[in-house]
Image (cartoon, rainbow, N blue to C red):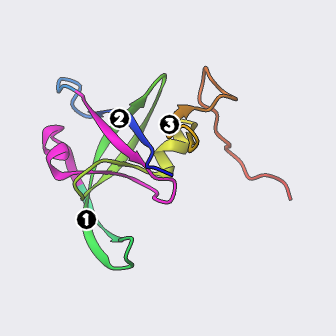
Amino acid sequence: MGLTRARVRLANARRPDLAAIEVDALADTGALHLCIPEHVAIQLQLDELEKREITMTDGSKRLAPYMGPVIISFANRQCYAGAMALGDEALLGAIPMEDMDLVVMPGTQQVAVNPANPNIAVSIAKGLPP
């Protein structure tokens, strides 16, 4: 099984005058947040909102700048999020994928709009009954 990537468009939500950029993001349902390399945060002129302690895949912990706000766009979907500035490639985590109602299709190694909801993102806003 290979890695699944998604071409996403990133923009600074506070600076509509700045050009958005497109990146190939690794789709990782085991990660939570959007992570972007520092150079992407600089290009988008994102504000550092705070530092957050993060747990890396090897279990080690470190502080990372939490940048934003970012508009993430994919196909006919978009969401607003913060981004951890770390690593050497963009990583699209579960929170923005859920927010945009996207699904990972491992068989074709693609990210797609949820076929059950092709025209508008659907979210659950309440807990499900037991």
The amino acid type found where label 1 is placed reads Ala
Q: Residue at x 41, y 37 (%)?
A: 6
The label shown at residue 64 is: 1
Instruction: Tell me, yes or no, whether the two marked residues, 2 and 3, touch with CB atoms within 8 Å.
Output: no
The label shown at residue 121 is: none
Question: As rendered, which of 25 and 78 lies closer to the eye?
Answer: 25
Q: Residue at x 46, y 53 (%)?
A: 28
The amino acid type found where label 2 is placed reads Ile
- Residue 96 horizontal/vertical position (percent): 47, 44
What segment is highlighted magenta in the picture?
A: 20-48
Question: As rendered, which of 109 and 63 lies closer to the eye?
Answer: 109
Label 1: which secondary element: strand
Q: Is residue 12 visible?
A: no
The amino acid type found where label 3 is placed reads Gln
- What distance separates the C-alpha of mark 3 from that of mark 1? 28 Å
Q: Is residue 123 visible?
A: yes
Residue 66 placement: quadrant: bottom left
- For discs 3 and 1, the disc positioned in front in the rendered view: 3
Q: Is residue 84 magenta?
A: no
- Residue with the mark numbered 3: 110
- Residue with the mark numbered 2: 71
Sequence-wise first label, 2 or 1: 1
- Residue 2 horizontal/vertical position (percent): 46, 49
Q: Residues within 10 Å of mark 2 (few under 14, many from 20)?
A: some
- What distance separates the C-alpha of mark 2 from that of mark 1? 20 Å
Q: Residues within 10 Å of mark 3 (few under 14, many from 20)?
A: some
Label 3: which secondary element: strand
Residue 56 placement: quadrant: bottom left
Residue 106 placement: quadrant: top right
